[in-house]
Image: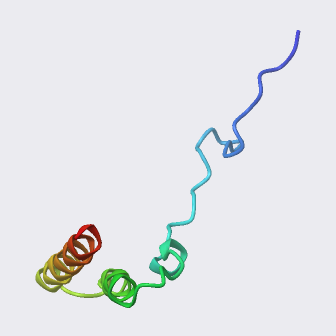
Amino acid sequence: MTSPQLPLSFSPSGVPAPRPMPTPATLMPGPTGHHAVDAAVRAVANTADLPLAEQLAAYEAAHKTLREVLTAIEA
């Protein structure tokens, strides 16, 4: 009889081992080569420590910028 394979995150106590939380630095993609897009991505990455209202404003500004860039590309 063979024993079952245990998941890599298994711990002897039966509780899965915690995974490290991602940080903005680990989630940041590399540069796109487009200044406005790179600035929008950096602005969103820098929102983690801002109050919620300021985060929302940053997300909306980044969305507007990205929408404008895509519109210009499609034209």
Residue 38 in the figure: left or right of residue 7: left
Vertical order, 74 against 4 (above or below): below
Q: Residue furthest top?
A: 1
Which residue appears at 36% of the width and 80% of the height?
41
Image-quadrant location for residue 71? bottom left
Residue 17 in the figure: left or right of residue 42: right
Residue toward you, 2 or 49: 49
How many discs mark residues in the rendered view?
A: 0
Which residue appears at 87% of the width and 15% of the height?
2
Residue toward you, 51 or 11: 51
Q: Position of residue 75 (x, y in %)?
A: 22, 70
Residue 10 in the figure: left or right of residue 30: right
* Colouring style: rainbow
Which residue appears at 49% of the width and 72% of the height?
27
Q: Position of residue 52 (x, y in %)?
A: 16, 79
Q: Position of residue 25 (x, y in %)?
A: 51, 81
Q: Residue furthest right?
A: 1
Image-quadrant location for residue 10? top right
Quadrant containing the N terminus is: top right
Which residue appears at 65% of the width and 42% of the height?
13
Image-quadrant location for residue 15? top right
Residue toward you, 37 or 6: 37
Vertical order, 3 against 7 (above or below): above
Vertical order, 54 against 74 (above or below): below
Q: Residue furthest front?
A: 75
Residue toward you, 12 or 4: 4
Residue 61 in the figure: left or right of residue 49: left
